[in-house]
């Protein structure tokens, strides 16, 4: 039987003041079996004045994680089962888990707590600290202080030592023993200014009237719109097309599968977190078997080594997910709305069409219009509002056209086909379309277009369609020879159906997710450059942007997030090149 929420609030040290905030962040360095998290979750759910979203950052050692999460939970609570399922089979590092329809955000940190202190980016409002086995000293106290928002409450079990002096030096005041335990309670309120740790301008505007405009109704734009709407923002999505997913996001079905490399590169680590996060969204919002499936994916490596089976992977119909995201009650979508340029009035942005007519005003703007962002943000009138190095980054964006071949699974072989998607030299997906028919997708082609014109962007392809199908069949013969032989009549008998789209690709195959200016102070943000991995990276990029806008815990390590940042440059570029291009 669960304790009343009021008792949980008292015994757990939860703040009654959280009702005054849109979001509240906890840091727990002794996550253990998750009992304190579960108590906090229950108290939040029972409180009618709860904040819109609750962030809980939990540290757990690899040993405790293996003990609790590597075997089926013995708990009978449905909430414990949901926690166990979401947190299972996780590697070392930081992982974002969404629970209770995304309103509970658990950032699970598997590894050494002191290592995370240097790589976290959060402003915690309440901190539970178990320092008895942490190597506690004044430097650890200062590292902990860097994770606190002003006014944060610290409840800490500390070893013997000059703790009061160390905490005071780190900026804590009102240091006293708690009446019911041996723990110390303190408040972070240093006499000095916090500088870069002060809440960003956007956080100060995060009231119930905050309005964000997202330019683009593809997977990048819809994911950002949904991330902000979950946090209580009012969001308007503008798209120049007549319907959502009009560009590369309109792919009939795509794979959600992590990238793996021998050195576990940033792209691999980010794709691992991003794929799991995307599959959480699919499980919450879509119909399994019809719109998505946790099917697993078999990766063919050919001469590079044995084939690799991905368990936490599957396929998704992007349009279904985009529709589900955009259906959030805080989101309004306007089609046939072509944004041409922006004007700033104080802290408000006006978005105008080519004729100069105003489309709307917004406090925040997120550009998610793929290759279209290049011309829009490179325009001379945007120079005062962008980072000096951004034109270099935008100049590296490339349009890559792709065509996928589609068809119906032949009835005489349907029963013998494995429904497991295959990836490697192209991909092959076979899914059930209705009770008695299934469709297949093979492809897709890659045609780089360094300087796309209106004609090539409109056609979504350069080579003739028949040549695209021929290339897809050739790749399928390498990937799955028997399947290619069975489908060859469809390719040769007038050609199968097709889908074509233009992907926006960056130089390192990682998206640009971050601010338009250098520090994220003027309210302009961007998420573009998903390439062929929009289903893997878009939800993660959206969480990162929303966390930065709202001053919340980041979903990955700070050092790892830099690999997705919109301000990153090619390593080969010298400082003098940046300076010369920006003058």
Image (tube, rainbow, N blue to C red):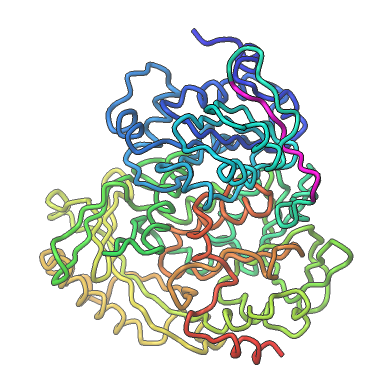
Q: Nearer the viewer, residue 18 or 29?
A: 29
The x, y position of residue 412, in whole percent, is 13, 55
Which region of the structure is painted magenta?
183-192
The residue positioned 74% from the left and 41% from the top of the image is 150
Answer above or below: position of 550 versus 84. Answer: below
Q: How many marks can you see?
A: 0
Answer above or below: position of 58 versus 542. Answer: above
Q: Nearer the viewer, residue 208 or 153?
A: 153
Q: Quadrant of residue 499?
A: bottom left
The x, y position of residue 298, in whole percent, is 22, 56
Q: Quadrant of residue 405?
A: bottom left
Residue 442 on the magenta segment? no
The x, y position of residue 313, in whole percent, is 32, 50
Residue 184 on the magenta segment? yes
Q: Quadrant of residue 147?
A: top right
Residue 191 placement, left or right of 107 = right
């Amino acid at each position: 039987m669960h304790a009343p929420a009021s008792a949980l609030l008292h015994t757990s040290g939860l703040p009654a003041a959280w009702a005054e905030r849109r979001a509240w962040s906890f840091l727990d360095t002794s996550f253990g079996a998750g009992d304190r998290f579960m108590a906090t979750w229950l108290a939040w759910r029972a409180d009618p004045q709860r904040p819109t979203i609750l962030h809980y950052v939990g540290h757990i050692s690899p040993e405790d994680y293996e003990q609790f999460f590597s075997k089926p939970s013995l708990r009978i609570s449905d909430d414990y089962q949901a926690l166990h399922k979401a947190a299972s089979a996780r590697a070392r590092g930081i992982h974002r888990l969404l629970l209770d329809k995304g309103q509970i955000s658990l950032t699970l940190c598997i590894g050494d707590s002191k290592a995370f202190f240097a790589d976290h980016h959060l402003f915690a409002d309440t901190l539970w600290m178990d320092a008895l086995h942490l190597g506690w000293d004044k430097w650890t106290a200062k590292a902990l202080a860097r994770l606190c928002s002003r006014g944060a409450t610290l409840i800490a079990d500390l070893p013997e030592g000059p703790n009061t002096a160390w905490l005071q030096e780190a900026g804590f005041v009102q240091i006293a023993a708690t009446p019911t335990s041996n723990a110390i309670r303190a408040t972070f309120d240093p006499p000095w200014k916090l500088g870069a740790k002060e809440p960003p301008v956007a956080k100060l505007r995060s009231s119930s009237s905050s309005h964000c405009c997202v330019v683009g109704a593809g997977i990048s734009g819809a994911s950002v719109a949904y991330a902000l709407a979950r946090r209580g923002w009012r969001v308007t999505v503008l798209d120049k097309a007549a319907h959502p997913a009009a560009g590369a996001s309109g792919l009939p079905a795509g794979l959600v599968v992590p990238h793996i490399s021998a050195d576990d590169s940033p792209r691999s680590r980010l794709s691992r977190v991003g794929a799991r996060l995307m599959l959480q969204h699919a499980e919450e919002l879509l119909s399994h078997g019809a719109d998505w499936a946790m099917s697993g994916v078999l990766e063919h490596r050919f001469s590079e080594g044995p084939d690799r089976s991905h368990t936490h992977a599957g396929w998704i119909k992007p349009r279904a997910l985009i529709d589900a995201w955009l259906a959030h009650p805080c989101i309004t979508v306007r089609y046939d709305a072509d944004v041409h340029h922006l004007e700033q009035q104080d802290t408000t942005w006006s978005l105008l069409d080519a004729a100069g007519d105003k489309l709307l005003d917004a406090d925040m703007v997120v550009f998610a219009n793929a290759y279209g962002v290049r011309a829009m943000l490179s325009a001379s009138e945007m120079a005062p509002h962008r980072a000096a190095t951004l034109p270099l980054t935008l100049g590296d964006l490339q349009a890559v056209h792709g065509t996928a071949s589609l068809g119906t699974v032949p009835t005489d072989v349907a029963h013998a086909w494995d429904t497991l998607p295959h990836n490697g030299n192209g991909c092959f997906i076979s899914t059930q379309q209705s009770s008695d028919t299934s469709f297949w997708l093979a492809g897709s082609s890659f045609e780089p277009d360094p300087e796309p014109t209106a004609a090539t962007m409109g056609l979504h392809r350069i080579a003739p369609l028949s040549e695209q199908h021929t290339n897809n069949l050739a790749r399928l013969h390498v990937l799955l020879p028997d399947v290619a032989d069975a489908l060859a009549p469809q390719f040769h008998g007038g050609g199968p159906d097709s889908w074509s789209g233009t992907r926006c690709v960056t130089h390192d195959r990682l998206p640009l997710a971050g601010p338009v200016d250098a520090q994220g102070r003027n309210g302009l943000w961007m998420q573009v450059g998903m390439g062929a991995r929009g289903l893997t990276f878009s939800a993660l990029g959206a969480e990162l942007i929303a966390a930065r806008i709202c001053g919340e815990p980041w979903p990955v390590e700070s050092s790892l997030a830099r690999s997705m940042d919109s301000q990153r440059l090619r390593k080969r570029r010298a400082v003098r090149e940046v300076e010369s291009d920006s003058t």
